[in-house]
Amino acid sequence: MPFVDFQNTHAMLSATVDRHRERPAFRWFTQPGVTAAVTWGEFYDQVRQVSKALMAIGVAPGDKVNIVSYSCYRWVLTDMGITCAGGVTVGIYQSSLPQDCRHIIDHSDAVFVFAEDNRQLDKLLDIRPHIPKVRKVVLFKGQVPDDDWTIGFEDFLALGRDIPDADFQQRARSTGPRDPAGIVYTSGTTGVPKGAVLTHDNITFTAQSVQGCTRIEDDDEVFLFLPLAHVFARTCVYATLLMGCTTTFTRSMETVVEDMQACRPHWFASVPRIYEKVYSKVISGAEGKGGAALKIFNWARAVGERVSDLKVAKKPVPLFLGLQYALATRLVFGKIQAALGGRVRWCISGAAPLNPEIGRFFHAAGVLVLEGIGMTEDTSFSHLNRCDNYRFGWVGQPGPGIAHKTAEDGEVMIRGRNVMQKYYKMPEETAATITPDGWLLTGDIGEIDSEDFLRITGRKKELIITAGGKNIAPAAIEGAIATSKYINQVCVIGDRRKFLSALVTLDEENVGAWAAAEAIAFRDLQDLMANPKVKALIEAEIAATNQRFAGYESVKRVSIVPEFTIENGFLTPTLKLKKNLVSHRYAEIIDAMYPGD
């Protein structure tokens, strides 16, 4: 496909504004079910205001500016304002602890910070003595303290009134494609987060590559609930910005379902955890009804899976099966589709592996989940299944303009204009990640077939080598176990051990309902975790899953532990498990599962 060599993000935005000036660009909820919106023309005018205000307070080309906030309209507005002024956007998760904020602010050399509200501002005030480079904090919303360090968003915008438009245009046009547009810090699952420097060309190229392998229409409505501090969400926004789609922001993770039904998107992107939660809720709901309702559900699922298999194989659906599927949709699948707004054409899953069983289930229900892969270092995009060419359990073919291959040890390597410039202030780590001829070492182990499809089989750093010398990638086993409605999270253990074991957390709602039906007395989750019958239930669920794997891949022992969360330090802000920390904290429990070692 032909690529437009945009000079920078401002040029990409300007091209969209020229085409779609009066079309809605972004929406956000002012109250449940009610949204406000800006057109692309209004958005551009506001981006210019932000850039001029930044210029007025002294942001120079190349200066780093942090945004610590959940996803919202002002996040995107500020990001574009920063890059159009020649600055570099550095996002921080709203869930980050003060010490994590301190590390990123200090390491990135940020001079200004945008904070979502007083909760985020309080974190910055706690660490203020340790971030002396920060000249000012701009508060998106909330009570502005009476000091000279913090300013409200409207007062901030007013600072740029006297900056001529010509000065803004000169600044916006002076930024080149190789100049940094953002620094995105990795999730830090195995160590200190690293700052991936993404250029304007990284962003504008990747947006076009995404466009080249999806069916994004100009008038699509898109729903966003992923955190914009994660490059996955940012890349989705840049793709919609390129095409001129309308993006609606959720109010919070707690209102995602309600807001999605009000937005009625044509597509959205998510991490696997959301699909897993929906899948578990649908299955447990059907089983909870029992009787005729469960029989109808199982019949519909069987019909849907037959239709799904034919579509994946690109074979026609026979007339009678098509009629059965129409009935199954009316009786069962229509409710699942309605829960997602009723007009989703496709959706994307990324950031972690999606269990093929879950992808197949949604496809059977009439919702196509296209799995892809990317990482911070390649602007969160390298591969994606296509709407007309997809497989479950594979991450698809590379995007246009992106090359891939595997090394001798099976590590997947990527090359293209999506690959980051470097790690900020980490030359040794950069040299260990990008080869002299431009290949990015992803750390993923995979295989590429004759049709250029990529399947990820594991992570190099997560490979388990048992005492018997078997190499095992735990992700597939963990994904299979997690499909149990009684199990919430899974961490498979077994490196240098005789067999695999697992630490699991409980799905409190479903295990609680099961315990009540079994007349098991309990007061809280702790009681359930300690109950021998619950332990036997979980062991039976894992035993059933073991049937799908080879003997050496089966989980022989299991321990139930409290939930892994961001707050207790076991999850990154992107919901990835810090396995090294889990293994350290639960060393005694793990050792107890291997009494002979």
Image: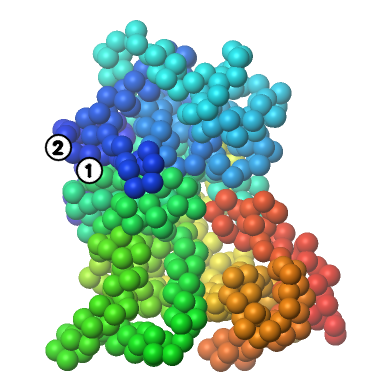
Q: How many marks?
A: 2
Of the 4 image quadrants, the one containing the C terminus is bottom right
Asked if residue 360 can be seen in this view, the reply is yes
Residue at 47%, 63% in the rendered image? 274
Query: Coloring scheme of the render?
Result: rainbow
Residue at 58%, 89% in the rendered image? 544
Q: Give how far across and how far down residue 198 sits, in percent.
A: 43, 41
Give the CA distance from mark 1 to mark 2.
8 Å
Q: Do the residues under discs 1 and 2 have CB atoms within 8 angstroms?
A: yes
> Residue 302 lies in what quarter of the image?
bottom left
> Residue 381 lies in what quarter of the image?
bottom left
Q: Secondary structure at mark 2?
A: helix
- Looking at the image, residue 260 sits to the left or right of residue 554; the answer is left
Badge 1, how many Cα within 10 Å: few under 14, some, many 20+?
many
Of the 4 image quadrants, the one containing the N terminus is bottom left
- Looking at the image, residue 395 sits to the left or right of residue 503; the answer is left
Name the residue carrying label 1: 244
Q: Give how far across and how far down residue 501 sits, in percent.
A: 70, 79
What's the amino acid at mark 1? Gly
Which numbered marker is on residue 568? none
Residue 417 against residue 530 in the figure, above or below:
above
Residue at 58%, 59% in the rendered image? 576
Q: Give how far across and how far down residue 281 sits, in percent.
A: 48, 72
- Looking at the image, residue 104 sits to the left or right of residue 582; the answer is left
Badge 2, how many Cα within 10 Å: few under 14, some, many 20+?
few
Residue at 76%, 72% in the rendered image? 527
Q: Nearer the viewer, residue 268 or 393?
A: 268
Name the residue carrying label 2: 19
Residue 105 against residue 239 in the figure, above or below:
above
